[in-house]
Image (cartoon, rainbow, N blue to C red):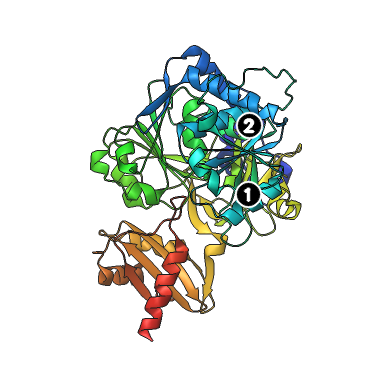
Amino acid sequence: MSLNLELKTQDKKLDSSKLKNLSLRDQVLFEEYGVGEKVNLPYEKIHHAFEYWAKKQSNALAAEHKGKAITYGVLDKKSFLLSQLLRHHGVKSGDHVGIFLERSIEMVIAIFASLKANATYIPQDARITPRTQLEYIISLSEIKVILTLSHLKAKIPEIDGVKVIAIDEVFINSDFYTESNTTPLTLGSNDNCFVLFTSGTTGAPNGVKVTHKNLINILMTRPGNLGMAPGKKVSQILNISFDMCAWETLGALVNGATLVIRDKSIQKTVEKVDIVIATPSILGSLDAEKCKNVKVVAVAGEPCPRFLADRWSEFCNFHNSCGPTETTIVNTVKAYSPIEKRLTIGSPTPNNTVYILDDNLTPLPIGEIGEMWAGGFCVSNGYLKNELLTDERFKPDPFLGEGHYMFRTRDLGRWTEEGELEHFGRTDDQVKIKGFRIELDSISRALESVESCKQSVTLKINSETLVSFVRPLDVDIERSRKLLKELLPYYCDPKLILSLDSFPKTSRGKIDKRILTQKAVKQLEELE
């Protein structure tokens, strides 16, 4: 071990003076486990990668939807023409452009048009986003131009000074605008590519500013590129305002693949593609037997049941991933095999770091549970016009130094001896019952070890009551209770274990805990 210690310290990446509270062994492992591979990025801006493929394979299929298709060459031309129209209407470098529509080929055109105009795009699904939220986003972002579709124009708020353009109406005449605006474009890789707004379930949504560099680092390096390449088909099944949609959409088109945009049926879309990106809840709703064509799957957004990982990894390369929007889609990835003794979230992606720290931001020894802080190229530009929250969640990185920042994920984790991260839920899922601190996810994972259980979620309903949900409907509840008593302390025993055929999902494909809470409250009231 002494030789390895010597070799590692010669190639140090972190400030060793900040690790002195750790043993020498843990100092070495804190760096070895926590620092991702260093790689060079191939482009300065994300759309430059798309433009490379548009020139190299102009006749290749870029995207298909509802029986329609568009080639790389035509997508490049149409997005350029639309970018010129945006600039004609006063869009300048760094301005925000609203992309308020639905999944479609026009959505892809709008994304690259905004990028070619050096603007920052803000995606929202106009079908389901409340008008008040659209108004809030328009006002906060100072949006002057909104791209949409003609049948959705009525859903866009009418605001003085805001131009609404229906893309499908524009392209009725392909020569609608051919003047070339040659004003120099000056944005660089550290400038914003898009702003993604949180769901806003606990108040006004926060806009996360994601840069070109952030995206290139995950979408164009391994394992984040997921093997996307010419000849591969990638599904687009997620909500357009969800950060994982960028993984699907931009990931496919900056790597030369074909994007298959779903209509109503996720199942039918997945049955004809090679690469799938989804939440565990969405993946769990699919019939895996009909999806043997799939070669690569990546899940993120919520904890993945091991049953699901085992099922899909039987016939494809399965990646379990983790990372909030603020760390650019995901910042840890695990290529999982059924022979693994545990399902982890892996290790940091290239050019990124993960630190396990205590409440005082002090490094914790290997194997101890603490809060995960993320550093490196994944760290986004903070929140739009919310300096207070930005200062609270983004801190100067004392380990990398030199102007780097790290982000407080609020996820709990620890390093295994193999150098992988075990996820233990979120700090706000750490609750107290009868004076004991409990991690809700630990109860759910225990329930998922029951043979018939495919997925579980546990909620704290009031100061003293836990309720767990399991699926499918025929999960053996008595067996579940017995196993919990064997695996966990008595105070982890939920008041109720309720079985459902399926879990309700949010528009972003995650478990809708709000609806489950309502069901739990109703069941508790019926018991009284």
> How far separated are the C-alphas under marks 1 and 2?
38 Å
Most extreme residue toward the bottom is 528
Callout 2: few (<14), some (14-19), or many (20+) C-alpha neighbours within 10 Å?
many
Residue found 74% across the figure and 24% down from its top: 186
Judge the density around disc 1: few (<14), some (14-19), many (≥20) Cα neighbours within 10 Å: few
Using residue 448 as the reference point, say whether residue 149 is left or right of it: right
- The numbered mark, 1 or 2, whose residue comes first in the sequence reads 1
Give coordinates of residue 236: x percent, y percent: 42, 37
| Relative side of 488 to 323, left or right | left
Q: Return the residue found at the far top.
A: 56
The residue positioned 33% from the left and 43% from the top of the image is 265
**Hey, what amino acid is under mark 2?**
His
Q: Which residue is mark 1?
A: 23
- The amino acid marked with disc number 1 is Ser
Q: Classify 279 as above or below 50.
A: below
Q: Quadrant of the C terminus?
A: bottom left
Question: Could you say whether the residue bearing mark 2 is in a helix, strand or loop?
Answer: helix
SS state under label 1 = loop
Q: Nearer the viewer, mark 1 or mark 2?
A: 2
Residue at 37% of width from left, 62% of height from top?
446
User: Which label number is shown at residue 84?
Assistant: none
In this rendering, is residue 304 above or below 44? below
Q: Nearer the viewer, residue 45 or 61?
A: 61
Mark 2, residue position: 212
In this rendering, does residue 342 appear at all? no
Q: Residue 511 appears at what percent x and percent y?
A: 43, 57
Q: Quadrant of residue 316?
A: top left
